[in-house]
Image (cartoon, rainbow, N blue to C red):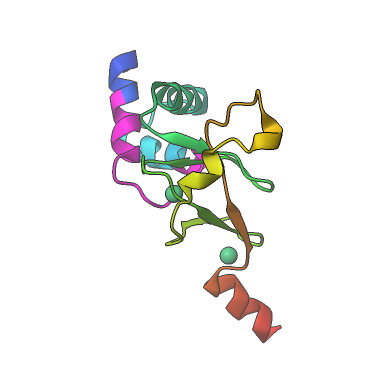
């Protein structure tokens, strides 16, 4: 039996709610299938994009690896592990002053800024030391 569009969106929204692991679309797809085995990958991707457009979640595009999705709505900075491609929140304080337009950039309008720290997570750093 097929589930309706609104139910599909509620399912995906439910999987993202309070999910602070920055899951990828594929990871959400795996979680969704446990609850609704007939759901398709396309449906999951479409609903994640829809929720992003609605501002319910945000999409994090990374210099390497797949996009990640974030349920936190406060501005914050991320750390990307270049080896396992996991994304972590950092405790760094968000610097709102970076959104002010410098004098030499008159005419520009800054809406947001991103800061991404890249390196190895503790797990991957540990593995690298053992090699
Ligand atoms: Zn790692
Ligand atoms: Zn985050």
Q: Which of the 4 quarters of the picture holds residue 85?
A: bottom right
Magenta span has 119? no
Establish if 101 lies above or below 40.
Answer: below
In the rendered image, the residue lying farthest to the front is 103
Establish if 5 lies above or below 11.
Answer: above
Quarter of the rendering occupied by the C terminus: bottom right
Q: Nearer the viewer, residue 68 or 58?
A: 58
What residue is shown at x 43% (from left), y 23% (from top)?
47
What residue is shown at x 64% (from left), y 26% (from top)?
108
What residue is shown at x 38% (from left), y 42% (from top)?
31
Query: Residue 29: x and y, percent?
Result: 45, 36
- Decide if residue 40 is on the left or right side of residue 105: left
Query: Residue 66: x and y, percent?
Result: 61, 42
Q: Nearer the viewer, residue 6 or 76?
A: 76
Q: Nearer the viewer, residue 80 or 35?
A: 80
Q: Nearer the viewer, residue 52 or 39?
A: 52
Query: Residue 18: x and y, percent?
Result: 29, 45
Q: Is residue 59 visible?
A: yes
- Decide if residue 103 is on the left or right side of residue 32: right
Q: Is residue 1 visible?
A: no
Query: Residue 102: x and y, percent?
Result: 63, 38
Magenta span has 19? yes
- Decide if residue 25 is on the left or right side of residue 13: right
What residue is shown at x 47% (from left), y 40% (from top)?
69
- Decide if residue 28 is on the left or right side of residue 116: left
Q: Which of the 4 quarters of the picture holds residue 89?
A: bottom left
**What segment carries the magenta color?**
10-27
């Amino acid at each position: 039996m097929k589930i309706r569009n609104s139910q599909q969106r509620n399912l995906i929204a439910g999987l993202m709610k309070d999910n602070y692991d920055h899951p990828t679309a594929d990871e959400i797809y795996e979680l969704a299938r446990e609850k609704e085995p007939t759901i398709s990958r396309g449906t999951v991707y479409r609903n994640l994009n829809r929720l992003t457009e609605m501002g319910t979640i945000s999409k994090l595009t990374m210099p390497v690896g797949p996009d990640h999705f974030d349920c936190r709505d406060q501005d914050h900075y991320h750390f990307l592990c270049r080896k396992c491609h996991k994304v972590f929140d950092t405790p760094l304080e968000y610097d709102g002053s970076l959104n002010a337009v410098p004098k030499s950039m008159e005419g520009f309008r800054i809406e947001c800024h991103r800061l991404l720290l890249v390196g190895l997570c503790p797990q991957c750093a540990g593995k690298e030391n053992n090699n």
